[in-house]
Amino acid sequence: MLGKLFAQEMRALWKPAAIMLAVMVVAGVVGIGCIEATDAVSRAAGFASRYVNEASAASNLTVVFVMAALFCGFLVWASLVAVYVFIAMRFYRTMFTDEGYLTLTLPVRAGTLVAAKFWAAFLLAAVFTLMACALASLAMLAITDGDGDMVSVVLSLLGGWSALTGNGVASSIMGVANALVSAAYTVGLAFLSLTLGAWWARRHKVAAAVALYVGIGWVISLVFSVVGVLAMVGDTGTASFMLGVVSVMQTVANLAVAGGGVALSAYLVRAKVDLS
């Protein structure tokens, strides 16, 4: 039954998600093209520097390409955010509105319903995350004229505190893996926040869910920020090791929030949420 529900969820999600993914890819490719064009125009401006009119035109064109590249980068980021918002709103609509009455009348356990929605949402989030990482890597290659080390630095930053311990292929892989864990964490926490909002709030349930999501996420982030800073101010010889430990702890905590959020959401939907 989980497989059937997952397939049904994907049928409902894939068309809007495909449009958002297409926007992300097109924006990313155009942005990379603008970066390459900026480099080409800058080189041409160097040759034309003795001619005032040509140099001024090249400078203006460079500004246009830079602004276009920044806008395309914003569209890539906005597409990633949009898919999470779309996933969250679909979960809320199909579970806690009038449509939720129909969903919950299915002869299926609440845990199976929530799990199917989570795995479909995580699959989409993972695809968008990997695509964003790929586009960021290509953009960095364009900016640095093919310097793969800078790509490793950028991807390793996704690994959180472990990024401060070094970079390279291993750090890049850890960064991407941590980004996928963060995607699961985001979906799981969003589901839990929406469920708690539907349970606790009499009015403005979505606003309550947003407040819960921001509050819980802020507390978790604050705790690991404090722990990470304390690890850095310790002995220099062990700081790198301690930061690695903190990064692993945060990854494990994110996985726990993702799994616990799904499990608690299923329990609350079954035992606490009243749609009447």
Image (tube, rainbow, N blue to C red):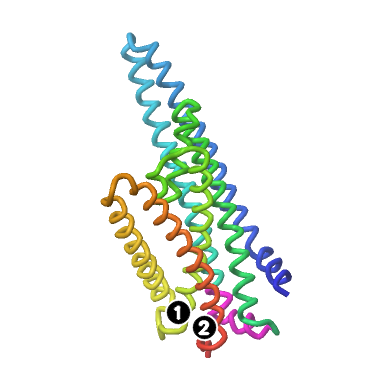
* Residue 104 colored in magenta in the image: yes
View extreme (left): residue: 233
Where 202 sits versus 71, above or below? below
* Residue 158 coordinates in the image, percent (x, y): 45, 48
User: Does the magenta segment cover residue 50?
Assistant: no
Q: Which mark is residue 268?
A: 2
Choose top left, top right, bottom left or bottom right for residue 118: bottom right
Extent of the magenta region: 92-106
The spot of residue 142 in percent (x, y) is 49, 30
Q: In what element is the residue under mark 1?
A: helix
Establish if 115 lies above or below 275: above
Q: Quadrant of the N terminus?
A: bottom right
Amino acid type, callout 1: Leu
Residue at (50, 31) in percent of width and height: 148
Q: Secondary structure at mark 2?
A: helix
Dividing the picture into quarters, in which one does residue 204 lie? bottom left
Q: Is residue 36 left or right of residue 101?
A: left
Neighbourhood count class around disc 2 (C-alpha, 10 Å): few under 14, some 14–19, many 20 upward: some
Between the C-alphas of marks 1 and 2, the distance is 8 Å
- Along the viewing direction, whichever of 148 and 246 lies nearer the viewer: 246
Residue at the spot of label 1: 196
Give the amino acid type for the residue marked by disc 2 in the picture: Leu
Tags 1 and 2 in contact by the CB under 8 Å rule?
A: yes
**Residue drawn at 38 percent across, 21 percent down:** 58
Please give the name of the residue rendered at 51% of the width and 64% of the height, measured from the top-left corner.
Answer: 255
